[in-house]
Image: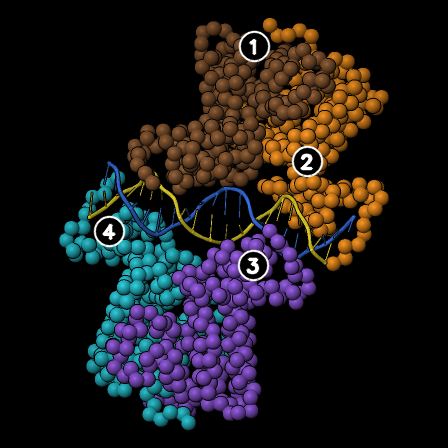
Chain colours: A orange, B brown, C cyan, D purple, E yellow, F blue
Amino acid sequence: MTPRPRAISSEDKAQKRNEILDAAETLWLEDQHEIANMHSVATAAGVAKGTLYLYFPSKEELFLSLHERQVRTFFEMIIERAHQAKPMNIHEMHTVVRRFIESTPAFLPLTTLVHGLLERQIPAETSFVFKERILNHLNQAVDALKPHFPNITAHMMMQSYAMIIGLWQLLRPTPLRELIKERLEDVACSDDYLNALESALNALWRGNLMQEPVS
Amino acid sequence: MTPRPRAISSEDKAQKRNEILDAAETLWLEDQHEIANMHSVATAAGVAKGTLYLYFPSKEELFLSLHERQVRTFFEMIIERAHQAKPMNIHEMHTVVRRFIESTPAFLPLTTLVHGLLERQIPAETSFVFKERILNHLNQAVDALKPHFPNITAHMMMQSYAMIIGLWQLLRPTPLRELIKERLEDVACSDDYLNALESALNALWRGNLMQEPVS
Amino acid sequence: MTPRPRAISSEDKAQKRNEILDAAETLWLEDQHEIANMHSVATAAGVAKGTLYLYFPSKEELFLSLHERQVRTFFEMIIERAHQAKPMNIHEMHTVVRRFIESTPAFLPLTTLVHGLLERQIPAETSFVFKERILNHLNQAVDALKPHFPNITAHMMMQSYAMIIGLWQLLRPTPLRELIKERLEDVACSDDYLNALESALNALWRGNLMQEPVS
Amino acid sequence: MTPRPRAISSEDKAQKRNEILDAAETLWLEDQHEIANMHSVATAAGVAKGTLYLYFPSKEELFLSLHERQVRTFFEMIIERAHQAKPMNIHEMHTVVRRFIESTPAFLPLTTLVHGLLERQIPAETSFVFKERILNHLNQAVDALKPHFPNITAHMMMQSYAMIIGLWQLLRPTPLRELIKERLEDVACSDDYLNALESALNALWRGNLMQEPVS
DNA sequence: AATGAATGAGGTTTCATTCAT
DNA sequence: CATGAATGAAACCTCATTCAT
């Protein structure tokens, strides 16, 4: 009816793009059973369906962009903390991770979906560029963390990231959780994903930062 | 056209079920861009479409069953090795993992898909039962490994499993791989997923089996 | 598993046939949203699917047979009452109708379905034979009612039957019923189907049995 | 292929909707063995399958809409005639009915189907609204007929409507028709549905408009 | 006679994307 | 730039029926 407010300047465009991503994120949180359809995203963003395609070449790339925005935020949070004068240890590191995960509940489910589904349906080139950017962020984080963890490597960061997403896929909140608590004897230290993750990252970093391999 | 060989006994039925899973596995390997449609599976298995639904309630549960068969095999390989007299160390452990992954190329992609997509479309009850069985296998593997790794825990195993799938999602063979090699300086020890995994599991187990936490 | 008790004698067969119809009638009453599938009928009747086809050539003819059994009962009830010495008037007639409808709640819905669906999918010959039998019953009823209503005709009976099923299709119990009550001013005499039917049959018979046409 | 003429204004949309209903009506007349599938309707209407779903939420509701359009026309024909100065009697009334039925051969078969099948598969709310509208038309017709038939009631109209559809289900042209002629002795006045209907409506109206009940 | 495993045609609906306006 | 009407491919699953046992 009233198509009006057009995004002319590139700031306007960037903002509209972000509004669309906001709408997609909201919808994703509302129902993670499946990715929202473009009609819903358009409606939630207050634009017409066709407009979405002015900002994103396809549905998959729209959600990939949303994911990328989240990942970027994740590494920015780490870098920001690392730049503070206060020294970090593994626990501090994990606190940042925990804070991000809790402040961005759409992150882990969407990560799983992106890796499981979207990536297959995205042009190799796009996928490549996406991963390149992620890797850049990761490397920047490594650099920022060097003062706190002199032995840190990009591999360590990638392993940690892998643990974050892999463990979530096994322990995501479901009816399963109750079962897991019963089956694992030493439940004391891991009654849910975040605790299990802390424990896992502790071990991982300890193992990586130790000099001596186990015999 | 020729409906013939009927599976009357329950052994016959189990075999037919497995034949269907074999067909699904083959198709999955041929094209991992998306799950094969039921028509293709039926044709590949040499049965009619309707027959598939005599053995599996839905497409999703068919592929979940395929995944479960693979996971079961994985833990059976571990248990089998553990039962041999010859002592194991971390490297031996990883050899088993590597052998399984290489002998079952459909495993990691399907795992990613199961966690990313299928699970959302499966009744909670089914999903629960599936996870329960996996957990059983995992616990049996822990028990079998106890003689070799006295300090092993179910959490360690779950962390390792999480690393296996999480790392694969980051490093799966794609155009990305070439990029990674360039970006990560110390490529020596990780020119692909399996090497990166060995390194990660080493660190993880080392960290878990060490007595002293890093300060 | 235990196929055994075979119906050899034709009484056995007739009884088994009736048991199947009983099962079908029960299922139909349980859910009138759609005709039960053959699997359900077989299960409810305690036989195998294939057995149904020993007694009925198709699903449609099974339900047509069920319908015919009900219609036969309907006319038998009328004839039985007509044979009693006690004289009948229109009201008595309607009492029989009401008693049948109330004792056979599956009748009217199934009649609607039979006319709306089944007939189209049934061989003309079968359909013909079915209607011929119904007509026989109807004519017998007319003969039986002659002593009570000397001017009665087969047409009157058919009109009455048409009113019974036509009115039900308009007034069948649904959320609509409440609405109808509000819309029709003179609700006094018809707060539901059975009352509306009595009123309609009264008018119909009165109009038929009157000598003089309205000018 | 050639999506062209877009219905933007609501008049355009209403027209397109009607064109779709026209196509459905034509197909229904061509073969009443079963409701045409959506592919056929789309092709006949010259639109794509998906377009049908822009105008009707489901196949059932499409055909229900078609039925409603017919019913509306029916009552409009009655009202139109009633508004003419020329006085009406029962015979005139029946002439309108006959003219409608003959000009809309799709009406009676579709009515039977709607009541027998479609209605079960339609949301109660939709079904309710449909019946409400029909009732409105019926009441308007009653009002329009008051000058001609001072004693007319909504119940009479409903009974007449019930007779129209009920009788058709019993006498619809089939192999049965020949049989009926042989069985009913006084064939003079009812050699087919329309004659039988006239006779029935005569009796019904006579009975309703008479002051004295039969003893 | 009875079983139930196997068949396979059949059709609705969704929804990402396009492009005329 | 923005809209939203139109497209049409795609695929799951049901279930009546058959027939080997």
**Is residue D109 left or right of C184 when viewed as pictured?**
left
Q: Which mark is residue C54?
A: 4
Q: Which of the 4 quarters of the picture holds residue B114? A: top right
Please check whether the numbered discs 2 and 4 fall on a single chain: no
SS category of the residue bearing label 4: helix
Name the residue beneath numbered marker 3: D46
SS category of the residue bearing label 2: helix
Any part of residue B39 in sight: yes
- Which residue is at 50% across, 76% downward? D74
Q: Chain of mark 3?
A: D
Mark in the foreground, 3 or 2: 3
Indicate the amino acid at tag 2: Leu
| Mark 3 in CB contact with mark 4 (< 8 angstroms) | no
- Where does the C terminus of chain D fall, quadrant-wise? bottom left
x and y percentages locating residue A80 in the rendered image: 81, 27
- Which residue is at 42% across, 94% downward? C215
